[in-house]
Image: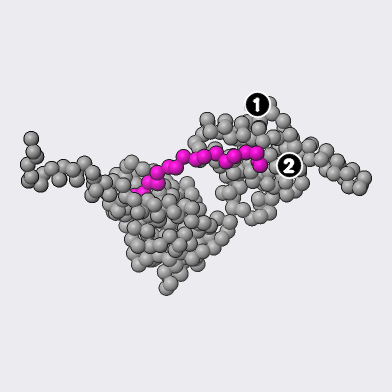
């Protein structure tokens, strides 16, 4: 019994000396060992940097064993004042992941996150492109390499709902032409099969013929210089298409195409379960939001069923009002 108590005391004394900086370094190594994507690790690094800066600015303890629930709550509150509610929630998720790792590795005995409530996030209205805006963007794509590639980019996003990281990592042998499907590697390196239609197939084939054989890379979508397209270049290409097409009033980004795909798919008769699989969602939470949006086109519904318009129509039915 004495040996066990001595061992426990030694472990508690050692955990108290582990600095936040050292703990975060170990956390990154754990993420790499779990083969998390570079994007996920960068996400964690950005939010944990904010946590370290907060501790420095407030002159708070630098050892993980001295980080309390109160300190973390104050950090989240500080985030809520400085950044969006979504980013504050990201900070909560990241610090929670850090302390989950610390508990598993016995670097802390009690998890301070147990006393921290998750912040409420503001429900942002999901913006989607109209059919006319999509047609306008396709219409400005020329017949040169960039134009043909951009047309293929737009149709792939609007027909398959890929994330931009999935679009950029698509390989030449991921396209299954006869089946009209593509093998997509999503978050957590999870693979899924996503189908595409005849229009997209035609655009992809046209691009494939113009792309030709580039021995240096198997990445499907390339820049005009033959380099693999990355997230930033994909954003820029789509933004330029949208700007030239006169699209205004919403963010022109790959994720807006993803939102548009989901809503249009449901409005055209698709079901939430197949949509969930195509989007690579682990649960139906986000898919339900798309379903609510697709079923509740508020402006159009109000034009059809306006109470005031109905009252006016009733008063104009030819009957005279009694005086």
Q: Could you tell whether 25 is left or right of 135 in the image?
A: right
Residue 314's tag is none
Q: Which residues are magenta?
A: 113-129
- Residue farthest to the front, as pictured: 323
Residue at figure coordinates x 50%, y 40% from the top left: 121
Seen from the viewer's position, the closer of residues 261 and 312 is: 312
Which residue in the structure is indicated by mark 2?
Answer: 110
Tell whether position 205 is magenta.
no
Q: Secondary structure beneath disc 1?
A: loop
Dominant SS of magenta comes to: loop
Which residue in the structure is indicated by mark 1?
Answer: 58
Look at discs 1 and 2 and give the one toward the viewer: 2
Vertical side of 299 occupied by 219: above or below:
below
Q: Could you tell whether 81 is left or right of 26 in the image?
A: left
Counting the numbered discs, the total is 2
Q: CA distance from mark 1 to mark 2?
A: 23 Å
Mark 1 or mark 2: whose residue is earlier in sequence: 1
Tell whether position 120 is magenta.
yes
Residue 300 pos. (x, y %): 27, 49
Seen from the viewer's position, the closer of residues 236 and 127 is: 127
């Amino acid at each position: 019994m004495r040996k066990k108590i001595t061992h426990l005391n030694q472990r508690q004394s050692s955990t108290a000396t582990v600095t936040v900086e050292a703990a975060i370094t170990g956390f990154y190594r754990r993420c790499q060992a779990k083969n998390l994507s570079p994007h996920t690790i960068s996400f964690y690094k950005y939010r944990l940097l904010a946590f370290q800066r907060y501790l420095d600015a407030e002159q708070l303890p630098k050892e993980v064993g001295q980080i309390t629930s109160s300190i973390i709550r104050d950090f989240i509150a500080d985030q809520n004042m400085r950044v969006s509610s979504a980013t504050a929630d990201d900070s909560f998720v990241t610090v929670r992941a850090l302390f989950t790792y610390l508990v598993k590795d016995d670097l802390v005995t009690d998890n301070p996150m147990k006393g921290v409530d998750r912040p409420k996030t503001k429900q942002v209205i999901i913006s989607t492109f109209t059919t006319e805006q999509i047609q306008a963007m396709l219409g400005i794509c020329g017949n040169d390499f960039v134009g043909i590639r951009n047309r293929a980019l737009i149709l792939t996003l609007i027909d398959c709902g890929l994330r931009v990281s999935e679009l950029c990592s698509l390989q030449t042998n991921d396209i299954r032409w006869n089946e009209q499907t593509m093998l997509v590697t999503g978050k957590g390196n999870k693979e899924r099969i996503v189908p595409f239609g005849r229009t997209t197939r035609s655009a992809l084939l046209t691009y494939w013929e113009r792309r030709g054989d580039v021995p240096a890379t198997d990445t499907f979508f390339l820049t005009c210089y033959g380099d693999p397209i990355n997230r930033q270049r994909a954003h820029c290409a789509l933004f330029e298409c949208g700007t030239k097409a006169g699209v205004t009033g919403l963010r022109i980004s790959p994720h807006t195409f993803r939102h548009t795909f989901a809503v249009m798919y449901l409005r055209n008769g698709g079901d939430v379960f197949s949509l969930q699989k195509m989007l690579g969602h682990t649960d139906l939470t986000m898919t339900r939001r798309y379903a609510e949006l697709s079923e509740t086109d508020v402006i159009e519904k109000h034009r059809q069923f306006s109470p005031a318009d109905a009252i006016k129509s009733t008063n104009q039915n030819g009957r005279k009002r009694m005086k």
